[in-house]
Image (spheres, rainbow, N blue to C red):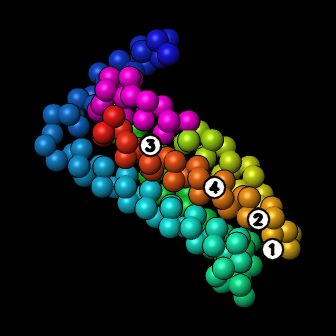
Amino acid sequence: MSYLFPFFKWCDGTWVAETIRGSKYLFPIIEAIHLLGLTVLLGIMVIISLRLFGFILKHESTRDLATDLRPFTWTSIVTMLVTGFMLFASEALKCFDSPSFRFKMACLFFALIFQVTVYHKATTSDKVDSSPGYARITAVLALVLWFGVGVGGRAIGFL
């Protein structure tokens, strides 16, 4: 991991990082926006997953539900990525040695890949509602990955 240290050091020295560190209010404001994005995304993931499990909204297709929620999903993800980079930059050197940060980044990497591949295919297919096994596995994996991002992020402050 030492090959990444120059990147972490560079992030720590950016004007964004220095501005956030130099302000009493910027970090908590950015963190609140970051957490709002995560909360909205997790809410959407729970709703769609409950639909994939067949527990709610049985009269509506998963495809229609996911399509209706897609703008909110991607707005939440982009919000989290932008504010997350700002928060990271302001504490980059602290994050370098953090196992919680590494866990969060691993979950985020796999969650994003999963989101644009398997999850997208599952929630846009007309067949997902007739394939409960596939739908349930997709729902469980999406929830585990995105909640892993949240748990990893929360743990950064403690470990």
How far from the left and from the top, in percent, is residue 7?
43, 19
Magenta residues (range)? 88-106
Other residues around mark 2 within 10 Å, as few (<14) / some (14–19) / many (≥20): many
N-terminal label among 4 and 2: 2
Residue receiving disc 1: 129
Q: Camera-side residue: 142 or 37?
A: 142
Alpha carbon distance from label 3 to label 4: 15 Å
Kindly identify the amino acid type of the residue bearing the numbered disc 4. Ala
Q: Report the quarter where the C terminus lies.
A: top left
Kindly identify the amino acid type of the residue bearing the numbered disc 1. Asp
| Pointers 1 and 2 in contact (C-beta within 8 Å) | yes
Q: Is 95 in the magenta?
A: yes
N-terminal label among 3 and 4: 4
Q: Which mark is residue 2?
A: none
Left or right: 20 as drawn, with respect to 83: left
Q: Residue at x 66, y 79 (%)?
A: 55
Other residues around mark 3 within 10 Å, as few (<14) / some (14–19) / many (≥20): many
Residue receiving disc 2: 135
Alpha carbon distance from label 4 to label 1: 17 Å
Magenta segment, prevailing SS (helix, strand or loop): helix
Classify residue 106 by image quadrant.
Answer: top right
Residue receiving disc 3: 152
| Pointers 3 and 1 in contact (C-beta within 8 Å) | no
Kindly identify the amino acid type of the residue bearing the numbered disc 3. Gly
Q: Residue furthest front?
A: 159
How far from the left and from the top, in percent, is residue 97?
38, 23
